[in-house]
Image (tube, rainbow, N blue to C red):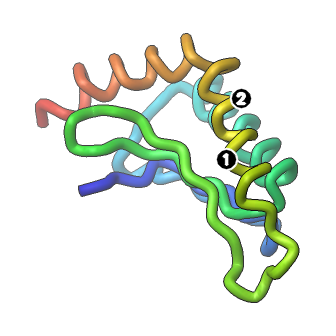
């Protein structure tokens, strides 16, 4: 099972953060928002951030099925870049999840 924390949609120019489940300081939610908004603009897709049951963070990018110009290879490369560049932040989120959310 997956739990979605936040989603940024390039097509509708909307952002969603699941604040009913995740109560984080504003500085952290702002960082997540910044990462997702930038990623959705660069990939020209729908970027989701969440957690698997085991506490591992996932970052995915999908497209509108009607978008024939979507570059899935470029989107996956961008997600790899984010994982590498934001590794410490991702590790901290995974630790936070395992301490404060997974055990509930």
Q: Residue at x 53, y 25 (%)?
A: 25
Q: Secondary structure at mark 1?
A: helix
Q: Secondary structure at mark 2?
A: helix
Residue 97 appears in view: yes
Residue 41 lies, with reference to residue 80, above or below; the image says below
Residue 8 coordinates in the image, percent (x, y):
68, 57
Label 2 crowd (10 A; few <14 / some 14-19 / many >=20): few
Task: State the image quarter where residue 13 is shown.
Answer: bottom right
Residue position for label 2? 81
Q: Residue at x 37, y 24 (%)?
A: 94
Label 1 crowd (10 A; few <14 / some 14-19 / many >=20): some
Task: State the image quarter where residue 12 is shown.
Answer: bottom right
Mark sitting earlier along the chain (1/2): 1
Side of 71 where 52 appears, left or right: left
Residue position for label 1? 76
The quarter of the picture where the C terminus appears is top left
């Amino acid at each position: 099972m997956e739990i979605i924390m936040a989603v940024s949609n390039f097509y509708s120019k909307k952002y969603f953060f699941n604040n009913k489940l995740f109560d984080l300081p504003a500085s952290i939610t702002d960082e997540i928002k910044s990462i997702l908004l930038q990623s959705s603009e660069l990939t020209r897709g729908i970027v989701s951030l969440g957690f698997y049951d085991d506490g591992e963070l996932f970052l995915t990018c999908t497209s509108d099925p009607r978008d024939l110009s979507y570059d899935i290879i470029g989107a996956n490369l961008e997600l790899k870049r984010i994982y590498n560049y934001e590794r410490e932040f991702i590790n901290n989120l995974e630790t936070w999840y395992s301490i404060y959310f997974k055990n509930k």
